[in-house]
């Protein structure tokens, strides 16, 4: 029997790696993104679950509602939720926060894919959609950065 890592374990490990390489300002932005992702998982990601996983989640919430989704679900559920997270409200006014947001999601998602933690046989379309969304947002972030630079020049 294989025991899969929970989203909570995955996020704690990933956050630790991200913070090791970050300066103070970037670390603050990384923590903001991680907090928003965790909040999103607890409030919106349940809609991505099948009925059996919804039942497990509801049972876990009876014991401790805080962080229940991240404690009970695994990498496959995280990948599906990341795509939904990226489709939601994304930081648009602060290009540094937007870049951190995108770097965080891209590193997390594709780290799971490269590590073989995600079942690509079942989730290849979700991963492809996530890659497309990341490319679109990355292009948009670069455009925002150029526009901001041009406003400073004028």
Image (tube, rainbow, N blue to C red):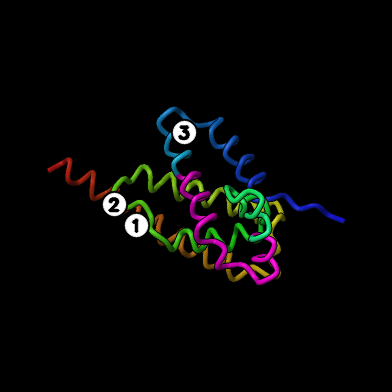
Which corner quadrant holds the C terminus?
top left
Q: What residue is pinned by disc 2?
A: 144
Q: What element carries label 3?
A: helix
Q: What residue is pinned by disc 3?
A: 27
Which corner quadrant holds the N terminus?
bottom right
Point out the tag, 2 or 3, that comes first from the N-terminus. Answer: 3
Towards the viewer: 96 or 74: 74
From the viewer's perspective, is residue 143 above or below residue 126?
above
Q: What residue is pinned by disc 1?
A: 140
- CA distance for labels 3 and 1: 23 Å
Q: Is residue 52 magenta?
A: yes
**Residue at (35% x, 52% y) in the render:** 141
- CA distance for labels 2 and 3: 22 Å
Residue 114: x %, y % from top left: 67, 53
Residue 30: x %, y % from top left: 47, 39
Towards the viewer: 95 or 32: 32
**Residue at (44% x, 48% y) in the render:** 101
Q: Give the range drawn in magenta.
A: 33-57
Residue 48: x %, y % from top left: 58, 67
C-beta proximity under 8 Å, tags 2 and 1: yes
Q: Residues within 10 Å of mark 1 (few under 14, many from 20)?
A: some
């Amino acid at each position: 029997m294989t025991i899969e890592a929970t989203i909570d374990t995955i996020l704690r490990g990933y956050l630790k790696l991200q913070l090791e390489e970050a300066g103070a300002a970037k670390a603050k932005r990384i923590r903001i993104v991680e907090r928003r992702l965790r909040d999103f998982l607890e409030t919106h990601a349940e809609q991505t679950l099948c009925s059996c996983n919804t039942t497990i989640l509801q049972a876990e919430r009876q014991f401790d509602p805080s962080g229940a989704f991240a404690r009970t679900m695994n990498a496959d559920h995280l990948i599906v939720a990341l795509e939904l997270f990226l489709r939601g409200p994304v930081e648009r006014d602060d290009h540094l926060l937007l870049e951190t947001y995108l770097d965080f999601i891209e590193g997390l998602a594709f780290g799971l894919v490269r590590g073989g933690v995600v079942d690509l046989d079942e989730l290849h379309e979700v991963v492809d959609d996530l890659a497309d969304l990341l490319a679109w947002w990355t292009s948009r972030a670069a455009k925002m950065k150029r526009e901001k630079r041009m406003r400073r020049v004028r």
